[in-house]
Image (cartoon, coloured by chain):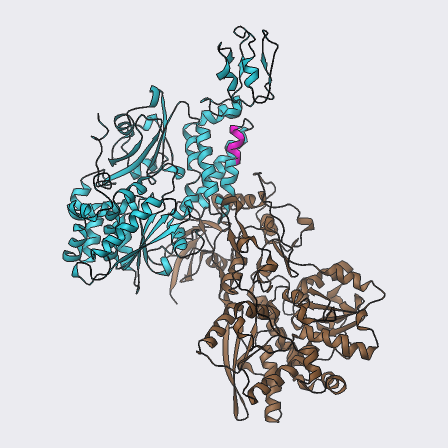
Chain colours: A brown, B cyan
Amino acid sequence: MKMINITINNKKLSVPEKSTILDAAKMLNIKIPTLCHLKLEDFGIVNKQATCRVCVVEVEGRNTLVPSCAQECVEGMVIKTDSIKAISARRANVELLLSNHPKDCLTCAKNLDCELQTIANHLNIREIHYQGEMMNYPKDESSLALIKDPNKCVMCRRCETMCNEVQTCGVLSAVNRGFDVVVSPAFNMDMINTACTYCGQCVAVCPTGALTEVNNTNKVWHALNNPNKHVIVQVAPAVRVAIGEMFDMPPGTITTGKLVSALRALEFDRVFDTDFAADLTIMEEAAELIHRIENNGTLPMLTSCCPAWVKFFEHQFPDLLDIPSTCKSPQIMFGAIAKTYYAKKANIDPKDIVVVSVMPCLAKKAEAARPELTKDDQQNVDIVITTRELGHMLHEAGIDFKHLSEEPFDEMMGESTGASVIFGTTGGVIEAAARTAYEWITKKPLEKVDFTQLRGFDGVRSATINIGDQQLRIGIAHGLGNARVLLENIQKGISQFDAIEIMACPGGCIGGGGQPYHHGDVEILKKRQMAIYQEDKNHRIRKSHENPAIKQLYKDFLGSPNSPKAHELLHTYYTPKERI
Amino acid sequence: MSVKSKQVRIALRNCGFINPLNIHEYIAFDGYQALAKVLLNHTPDEVIDIVKESGLKGRGGGGFLTGLKWQLTRQSVSDEKYIICNADEGDPGAFMDRSILEGDPHSVIEAMAIAGYAIGAHHGIIYIRAEYPLAISRLEHAIAQAKSFGLLGKEIFDTPFNFNIELKLGAGAFVCGEETALIHSCEGNRGEPTSKPPFPSVKGYLDKPTSVNNVETFANVPAIINLGAPWFSSIGTETSKGTKVFALAGKVNKVGLIEVPMGITLKEIIYDIGGGIVNNKKFKAVQTGGPSGGVITVEDLDTPIDYESLANIGSMMGSGGMIVMDEDDCMVNIAKFYLEFTQEESCGKCTPCRLGTKRMYEILDKITSGDGDMDDINKLETLGNVIKNTALCGLGQTAPNPVLSTLHYFYDEYIAHIVDKSCPAKSCKALLKYSIDAEKCIGCTACARVCPVSCIAGKPKELHIIDQSKCISCGACYDACKFDAVIRP
């Protein structure tokens, strides 16, 4: 690697070619403040806009200050990161942002999680010298998943980068000019009328309270306090490896047992596991795949667990609606089973059951309300909260999460396998499916359950798995832009697969829009992924079809995978949607 | 002195002399000779050398050496390159480029083909604002003619050189005159600048090497090729060669487009060409460089103008707006006018330009309304410097210039507005306090009858009095009084 010699604050150092000044300063343990900057290295995600002008530094020979996030080092460059000129310019730019920002920090959804707040504090801003007109746009609360408050926007454009470059949804972009500029869908449409998939990646990267989730915690409190309701909760795989971060636990801490204790402490009537439903999904999905392969059905088969992905293909590939699996997502399968099988076994009227989901995801909120997933005016799942919202509820209830003891899930819908927990990361669903498909096709036990060729963080991956004398060609994409590439290649006939797993969020559900904020630190996502695979290893049973509770469910209620009963409860259909 | 004698016409050489709709007339005036010459007799590198030797600098405002820009674009390795003509003229009051495109469209087309040959591009784009319908139709007509004459298209002059030009219409955003914003707009994206580097010569239109040159720059090129670099560089100053077209406007007797050699003084322009100040009033300042420029005062009237000297006195060449102001023009108000323009035309991408110019405008508005305080001066200076130092593009970095320059040269006027609550030029209405001379008022009631806010009280044949708290300083009473009894501040 070519090295470049530079000087920062009178210290000489060599940095690899293409390093930015920001990168170089980091090598000297200088953290230049940044606001719009976002770089998730291993995902190839960079917000290159350089709009905030907060990270400016002095470069010898340059008349103007230079944004350190965008400027690459050049041989012989002499840089000052701490001159009064640079520091006061940073401060002035942050003051300008604050002069156009509501000062309702104490009641803002992002309070203490806001990067603007942090930067104002770090820059020692104690007075805002500039006052004047402030933006006054209406809030967009049209969708069930996210809220857009343009008045808190600092025009970092991270959301645009995620929406357009990473996810290729093209919903959010800057409109108008000058002071009136605002990030908005085309024609000022409400979010609910757009092709937004509710992946929530805009929310995941928004530095302020301009994009937040729809908060459903009050609905949960009301349900919990209603004596006539039997409130059960399910937790998605990715929640257990992330929620600890909200209680000062290191990223990647596995907190499954504490999570169960915490939910019991909130007095849910039953604490169940979405992993149970993930195993069920594998039963149905693997059966569907084998059926398609054996009967010359449509291939590839695409996974359908991710609601953002489902909405994406409905908008963007309406002519390919026959290729996704018809399986409902695990969250919805859970609800469907809870309100039939569980209701019957527990002898409770399904109308009195409230199914609450804790999800790493915003799209799950909108998914729960899809008319296809509602039966007799009853949603399969009633209330969806995110990992973050659960964290806030636990804070509210004063539950000392970190010191809770570990408890197991309740029986009947709480048992799970290692196969289901890896649903939380990219590559996991298809690996779980492969474990089951292998045994079903070959009728032999699978000795080595880890399909490591399916793992990793590359945006588009492919692998061929030998199953007996058959070869299963598998494609994997995470991030909707990568999914688009994969699908377009299939349309063009460039690539051929038997099964494809797609997750909308970079990294899969571990990087979901409802997870504790990673603030651009990709290491956090890696640690969550490692924890997911560790949790898989911790399970005694690591194949979905060996889950005893699942076996019981089929025996007592569903019959066999893809049976008429299973189809009625666990499968769905898709509807073409407009692209804009 | 006649209006013409101090002028030298190179860019405007054919404007008004030939019929722009008739290619034969352009050809009769040596049109397309330069293109033939370069295609038949010169290598691309030789063309670049000629343009470099001529010393031609970009006439759009930046003043970057045109030949060097072409050379950098030529040196970039790529399968495709582009040449773009920046016809997004947007400075208030400027119409140099429009006049060239309307009066001599072929000179730009010919020059673009020459530039295309020099940098290795086969495709040219003219980015022109949709508000210039006549220029657009003349260009369309001229491009069609050039094609039918084989001067655009394949194998021009039977050489292997192919070149075509298409028009892209801009929607009138001032910022699209900035080259990276212009390129994004051409691509169909939002017209907003991106950080440089990478420069367009490396990564421009569709990520290919691109040279963006202004209309007037192009109009000079055929003349340079035909008459030679030494001829061109013999005109002008040591560092700035050739001529510059200015849109002379404001309080001079003769307004309009002028083309003058670099090195001419402002005094020559205003008094010899412009015929002096209207009504023999006192000259106050000249504003050059449009919203990016600054004011030049009487003490610099004898400075020979070129790119460097204008920058040294706090203004800039810009694209050629030149507005002359007299004693009736309030400099705070002028600064406010430009800030209003830039803050509206900011793309809104970077913080200092989006919010900084807005706050500066608000402060200026406060000062001209009589509500300013001394701290506002500090704020203007601080904000001005922060914007200059941290804005993303040239538009933002130069936006505070009108304020910083007037603050420098007309500090007293700011103080008068803030401390004395008066506008020395009697231009800021909020600071004008009318009163009635008790000696002269005969109580005719004329003033009270015209007052739109009914703030003048008094019985007929008795002294009338203006309620200062309600007065909006419209001046209607002053105009209505036949006895000179209303005292204008």
**Left or right side of B257 for A574:** right
Horizontal and vertical percent for residue B256?
30, 33
Q: Residue reaching furthest right?
A: A227
Q: Which stretch did the figure color magenta? A: B362-368
Q: How many numbered marks are there?
A: 0
Tell which of B282 and B251 is nearer to you.
Answer: B251
Across and down, in percent, residue A476 comes to 53, 76
Q: In the rendering, at what x and y percent does residue B358 appear?
A: 51, 40
Q: Quadrant of residue A198?
A: bottom right
In this rendering, position of residue B25 left or right of residue A38: left
The correct choice, above or below, for B410 with respect to A59 in the image is above
Residue nearest the observer in this picture, B222 or A121:
B222
Look at the image and say whether residue B365 sits in the magenta stretch: yes
Observer-nearest of B355 and A139? A139
- Left or right: A229 in relation to A255: right
Q: Quadrant of the N terminus of chain A?
A: bottom left
Tell me: residue B452, above or below residue A205.
above
